[in-house]
Image (cartoon, rainbow, N blue to C red):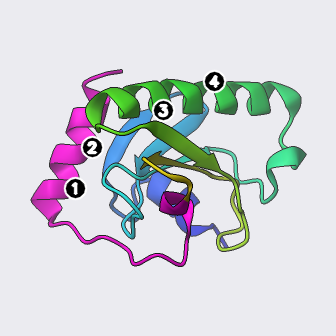
Amino acid sequence: MASIFSRIITGEIPCYKVAESETCFAFLDINPLAKGHVLVVPKIEVDYIFDLEEETYIEFQLFAKNIAIALKKAIPCERIGVTVIGLEVPHTHIHLIPINGVNDMNFTNKKIHFTKEEFEEIASSIASFL
């Protein structure tokens, strides 16, 4: 059965898409730790990041870097935090999170809620810097 991320990539499940390449996809986390919290995934469904083929891994990391640069321009913050946990969904993914301190990356923190229109505006703003 396809992962939730594969279903998002194919359009079966809606998302707030930020960007897409031939091999990668970026969209807003719907349970964000911060405004602009983005998930970056390879289109190929591989559970563990270090099981990606080398070429795919490199493309994936470079794609995430470009998203992070755009995210930093769109959302005022000190840095873009990066984490790969990979336990909650069996599909490699990188979290890009605007942060102003290390505690902003604590996944036990309360999640922020946005309206559909706010999510759309955030995604559009990030995409405009790509």
Residue type highlighted by circle 2: Ala
Q: Quadrant of residue 125?
A: top left
Which part of the image, by quadrant, shows the N terminus? bottom right
Which residue range is magenta in the image?
Answer: 103-130
Q: Earlier in the sequence, mark 4 or mark 3?
A: 4
Q: Residue at x 86, y 29 (%)?
A: 54
User: SS for tag 4?
Assistant: helix
Please name the residue that numbered disc 3 is placed on: 68
Residue type highlighted by circle 4: Leu
Please name the residue that numbered disc 4 is placed on: 62
The alpha-carbon separation of the residues under discs 1 and 2 comes to 6 Å
Q: Residues within 10 Å of mark 1 (few under 14, many from 20)?
A: many
Left or right: 66 in relation to 85: left
Please name the residue that numbered disc 2 is placed on: 123
Q: Earlier in the sequence, mark 3 or mark 1?
A: 3
Please name the residue that numbered disc 1 is placed on: 119
Left or right: 5 in relation to 111: right
Residue 60's spot in the image, x, y percent?
66, 33
Residue 74's spot in the image, x, y percent?
27, 32
Left or right: 130 in relation to 116: right
Q: Residues within 10 Å of mark 3 (few under 14, many from 20)?
A: many
Q: Cβ–Cβ below 8 Å for labels 3 and 2?
A: no
Q: In the rendered view, tell whether residue 123 sits above or below residue 10.
A: above
